[in-house]
Amino acid sequence: MEELDAAILEEKEKLVKSKKLRLLYLDEEDMIEAGVLDAKKCVDVMEETVGLLEDGDFIMGGPDHNSHGIMLEFPKQSDIEGFPINDGADRRFIAMPAYLGGKFHVAGCKWYGSNGNNRRMGIPRSNLMFVLNDVETGAPLAFMAANLLSSMRTGAMPGLATKLLAKKDARVLAMIGAGPIAKACFRAIMTNASQIDTVKIKAGSLKSKTAAALKEYIERHYPRVKTVTVCDTLEEAVRGSDIISESVSVKPGQYPTYEKSWFKPGATLIATSFFNMDKRELVGIRKVVDNWKMYEEYGIEDQEGYDENGYRKPTGCMGEEFYYMVEDKLITRESIDSLGEIIRGKKPGRKSDDEVIFVAIEGMPIEDVAWGHEVFLAAKEMGIGQQLKVWDHHSEEE
C-alpha cells in the first residue's frame, strides 16, 4: 500500500495543515492522457479487484453490501404535469457507491443518467461522473468524467474471463453487439487472446452503422485479424466461435436467445448485458459468475414469476437465470463457480479443451473505484487535471 499511502496521505496532510479542501477534476481528455484506455492494465486491475471481492475486502450498497447500485426509474405515465416519463428508452439514474480495500483503500461513487432518446440528438445514451473519496476523512480526492472509465472497466471483465477460462488457442471471436461497450470488450479480450485471427460481429442488422464502425476499427488497428464479418443472425455469429462476447442494449423481453447446439466444444460465452436460453439446456454447461451474492439480490428482488407452461419467465440476466435455476432445483449452488475463486486458486480454470463455459458479468461499483483510483494516481504523477476549490475555511462543523 506504499503507493496508495503516499498519494492519499499527501492530500490528507494538505487538508489538515491548511484547512483548505481541494479536489482534482479530470475531464475526458485528461482521463485519456492519464491512461483510462489502457486495456491491458485495466484487465490486471480488475483481476486484483475480483480477488479482493473473493476475500471480502470491500463494501457495496444494499442490505448485504453487494448491490449493483441504487436506481431511480421513472414511471410509464404520470398525472403530474412535466413529470419525467419512462418511454421505454432506458430512462433512469443510478448511484453506484463502494469501498475497496487492499492497495486501493478508497471509497467512491459513480452517478449516471441514461436516456435512449439521447441518440436521436447525437449524444451518448448515458452520461457518467465519478467521485473518489479518502476513506478516513471522507474528503473528495477527485471528480472525473466517467463514460470511458465505465466502459473500460466493463470491457476489462470479459478480458479477465478470457484470461482465466478461454482456450489459449482460440482463433474465432464473436462480438454480439457493436457499441462502445462491445468495443471495450473487444480491446480487453484481444490482450489475452493472442491467436484470434477471425472476428464475427452481430448487431441490429447487416446495415448497422455501429457494426460497420467496429469492423473498420478492427481492420485498421488489428492487422493480425485476417477476417472480419458482419453476421445476419445470432446463430451465424455463434456457430464455430471459440469466444462469444455479448454486450447488447435491447428492450425488455427482446433478449438474444441462444441454443445449446450452436456452441462448439470448448466455447466460452461471456455475457455483460442481456441473455436468454432454455434453462433445461443450461443444466450441463459450466457456469461462472463475477459475484454470486449480487445475483441473489437480483433474484430475491425481481421474482419475474412463471409462464403458462410453468417455466420461469426470462429476466435477461445470465447470473439471475443461474440463481433461479438453483431455486428451482435444476442445479446446485455448488455447481456455480466464481472468477474470484479461480483467481484465489479455490476452483480450477478451464478443465478441458472441450468444456463449454458460460460467464455472467454484470458490473460492480468496486470496479469503478479500482479503475478510478488507478487513473487518479496516474494523473497525480503526471500533473494532469485541474485543482478545484471545495472550501478554504469550513464555516460550520457538522
Image: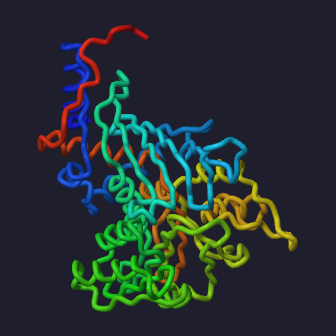
- The foreground one among 337 and 365 is 365
Q: How many marks?
A: 0
- The foreground one among 155 and 110 is 110
Point out the image quarter for the N terminus.
top left
Identify which residue is drawn at 44% across, 55% down.
126
Q: Position of residue 295 (x, y in %)?
A: 62, 54
Would you say 251 lies left or right of 266 here?
A: right
Vertically, is 214 above or below 262?
A: above
Vertically, is 310 above or below 64?
A: below
Vertically, is 358 above or below 56?
A: below
Which residue is most to the left?
382
Q: Position of residue 296 (x, y in %)?
A: 65, 51
Displayed quadrant of residue 289: bottom right
Identify which residue is drawn at 52% across, 67% down.
249
Displayed quadrant of residue 382: top left
Which residue is most to the front?
81
Q: Position of residue 149 (x, y in %)?
A: 34, 53
Vertically, is 185 above or below 352?
A: above
**Colouring scheme applied when the structure was drawn:** rainbow
Q: Position of residue 313 (x, y in %)?
A: 75, 66
Q: Is residue 164 visible?
A: no
Identify which residue is drawn at 37% across, 28% down.
135
- The foreground one among 233 and 56 is 233
Point out the image quarter for the C terminus.
top left
